[in-house]
Image (cartoon, helix red, strand yellow):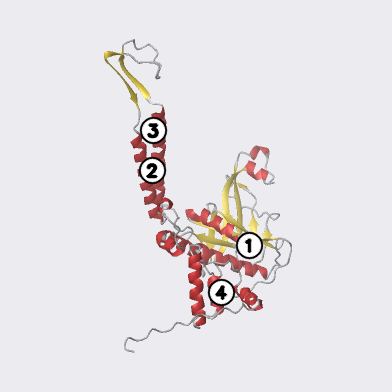
C-alpha cells in the first residue's frame, strides 16, 4: 500500500510544507483507490473533540478568492462580479466533505448555502485528515518551525553580505577613474587603456577607485561563519565534506551528525508516530468500507486491523564492513539462543530491502539447505606455564 500510493513522496512533501509550523495530510478514496493529498494550513481551521483533544471533529477551509477564479472553476459568476472578492468555503467532518456556495465578502449577514452538487459523503466515521504539528511546542494549531527566527535572521544577513560582496567584485572588474586637476582641462574626454596616457599637472593626480580582493574573501569567511551559526540554531549538519579524507562508517557518521539526528528524531515523532501511523490506520479502516484496488484494478486483500507499529531503519546506510559485523553478531546471538531467527531477519530487513520478514522466513525454509561447509578448526588451548 505504501508503494502503491507513493507514501514516501507524500511524507517528504508534508515535512517540507510543514516546516513552517503545521501541515494537513488528507486521505481520499476515489474509484476504490487510495490517494493522499498534502494541504498547507494557511486557510484551514481545525475543530478538536472536547473529550479527545487529539482527534479532529472537523476541518474548515475559508479564504478569499476573486470572482474570475470562481468562474474558472465553473461557478455561475456574472461578468460584472469577476473583479469582486468572494468567500470560498468547504468543510470536512466524519461523514462528508461539504462545499458551500461562494458568498460575496460584503454579504456579512447571509448564511452560506451548501453546494449540494459538489458535496460528497464518505461515511468513514472519522475526519479523513491528519493535522501535523511540526515540532514539539507551539499551540493547538501550529508546532515550532524547523527553521527558527534566529536562523532566518542570520540567513537574511548572509544574503545581504553576499549581495554587497557581489557588487564589490563587479566594481573591481570595472574600477572608477578619479582625476584631480588634469592639465588638458576638465571638458576633455579621457580614454582609459594601456595605449592612452593620462597627463595631469604637477598638482594633479589620477587614481582608480576599486575594492581590494581580500575584502571579498573576508565577506565569504563571514558568511561561512553565519552559516554555521544558523545550522547550529536549527540543529543542522555543520560537517564539511571537503575535510573528509576517506569513507566513514555509519556509526562514525551518526556521531559526527548527532545534532542533525536529534532534529530528525523529533520530526519522527510528529510525522512518523503521529501522522504516518494515523494515515495507515485510516487506510485499514477504509478497507472495511471499500473494496480497495491497485493501479491495475486488481482487488487488494482486506488489511489487518491489528495494532500497527513503525520499525525505523538505521540513520545511515551501513557499509560492507558494518554489514559483516552485524551478520557475525546476529549469527553468534542466534547460535547462543539469545535471539530468534525472526528477530535476526527483522534486524537485517532494512539493510537488504526485506519488505515482509515473515515471508522471508518462508522463503528461507523453502530454499535447499546450503552445502556442507568444512568444519572450523578447533583452537588448542595454550599449555599452562606450570605444566
Mark number displayed over residue 3: 1
User: Whole-percent x and y of residue 330?
Assistant: 50, 75
**Which residue reaches farthest right?**
297
> Where's the N terminus, which quadrant?
bottom right
Which residue appears at 41% of the width and 35% of the height?
166
Query: Label 3, label 1: how many angstroms apart (C-alpha)?
Result: 51 Å
Whether the residues at callouts 4 and 3 have beta carbons within 8 Å, the answer is: no
- The residues tagged by marks 2 and 3 sit, at their Cα atoms, a distance apart of 17 Å
Query: Marks 4 and 1, Cα distance to the nearest angstrom?
Result: 21 Å
Disc 4 is placed on an element classified as helix
Q: Is residue 91 left or right of residue 136?
A: right
For marks 2 and 3, the one nearer the N-term is: 2
Give the percent coordinates (x, y) of residue 149: 40, 51
Disc ID at residue 345: 4
Mark 2 vs mark 3, foreground winner is 3
| Mark 4 and mark 2: Cα distance apart in space | 51 Å
Few, some or many residues within 10 Å of mark 2 (<14, 14–19, 20+) = some
Q: Which residue is mark 3?
A: 168
Q: Which mark is residue 76?
A: none
Relative to 72, say whether 166 is above or below.
above
Q: In this figure, which residue is indicated by the disc labeled 2?
A: 157
Answer with mark 3 or mark 1, whichever residue precedes in sequence.
1
Residues at discs 2 and 3 in contact (Cβ within 8 Å): no
| Tally of numbered discs | 4
- Residue neighbourhood size for the residue with mark 3, other residues' Cα within 10 Å, grouped as few (<14), some (14–19), many (≥20): some
Q: Are circles 4 and 1 on residues that touch, CB within 8 Å?
A: no
Element at badge 2? helix
State which quarter of the image contains the C terminus: bottom left
Q: Earlier in the sequence, mark 4 or mark 1?
A: 1
Residue 344 in the image: state x and y as whole percent: 54, 75
Q: Residue 250 versus residue 22: which sits nearer the camera?
A: 250
Amino acid at each position: 500500500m505504501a508503494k502503491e500510493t507513493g507514501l514516501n513522496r507524500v511524507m517528504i512533501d508534508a515535512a517540507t510544507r510543514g516546516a513552517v509550523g503545521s501541515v494537513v495530510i488528507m486521505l481520499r478514496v476515489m474509484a476504490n483507490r487510495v490517494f493522499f493529498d498534502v494541504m498547507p494550513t494557511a486557510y484551514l481551521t481545525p475543530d478538536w473533540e472536547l473529550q479527545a483533544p487529539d482527534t479532529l471533529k472537523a476541518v474548515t477551509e475559508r479564504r478569499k478568492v476573486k470572482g474570475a477564479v470562481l468562474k474558472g472553476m465553473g461557478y455561475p459568476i456574472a461578468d460584472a462580479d469577476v473583479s469582486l472578492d468572494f468567500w470560498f468555503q468547504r468543510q470536512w467532518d466524519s461523514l462528508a466533505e461539504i462545499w458551500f456556495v461562494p458568498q460575496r465578502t460584503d454579504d456579512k449577514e447571509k448564511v452560506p448555502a451548501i453546494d449540494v452538487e459538489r458535496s460528497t459523503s464518505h461515511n468513514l466515521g472519522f475526519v479523513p485528515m491528519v493535522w501535523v504539528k511540526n515540532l514539539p511546542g507551539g499551540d493547538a494549531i501550529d508546532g515550532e518551525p524547523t527553521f527558527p527566527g534566529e536562523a532566518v535572521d542570520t540567513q537574511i544577513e548572509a544574503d545581504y553580505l553576499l549581495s554587497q560582496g557581489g557588487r564589490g567584485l563587479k566594481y573591481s572588474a570595472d574600477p572608477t577613474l578619479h582625476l584631480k586637476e588634469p592639465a588638458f582641462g576638465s571638458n576633455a574626454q579621457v580614454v582609459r587603456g594601456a595605449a592612452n596616457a593620462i597627463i595631469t599637472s604637477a598638482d594633479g593626480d589620477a587614481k582608480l577607485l576599486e575594492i581590494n580582493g581580500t575584502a571579498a574573501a573576508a565577506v565569504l569567511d563571514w558568511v561561512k561563519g553565519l552559516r554555521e551559526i544558523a545550522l547550529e540554531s536549527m540543529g543542522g549538519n555543520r560537517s564539511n565534506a571537503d575535510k573528509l579524507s576517506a569513507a566513514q562508517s555509519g556509526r562514525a557518521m551518526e556521531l559526527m551528525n548527532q545534532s542533525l539526528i536529534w532534529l530528525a528524531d523529533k520530526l519522527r515523532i510528529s510525522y512518523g508516530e503521529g501522522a504516518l501511523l494515523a494515515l495507515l490506520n485510516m487506510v485499514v479502516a477504509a478497507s472495511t468500507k471499500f473494496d480497495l484496488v491497485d493501479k491495475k484494478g486488481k482487488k487488494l486483500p482486506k488489511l489487518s486491523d491489528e495494532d500497527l507499529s513503525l520499525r525505523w531503519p538505521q540513520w545511515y546506510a551501513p557499509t560492507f564492513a558494518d554489514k559483516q559485523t552485524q551478520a557475525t553478531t546476529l549469527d553468534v546471538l542466534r547460535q547462543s539462543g539469545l535471539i530468534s531467527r525472526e528477530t535476526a531477519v527483522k534486524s537485517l530487513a532494512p539493510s537488504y530491502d526485506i519488505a515482509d520478514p515473515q515471508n522471508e522466513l518462508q522463503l528461507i525454509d523453502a530454499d535447499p539447505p546450503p552445502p556442507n561447509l568444512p568444519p572450523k578448526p578447533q583452537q588448542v588451548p595454550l599449555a599452562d606455564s606450570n605444566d
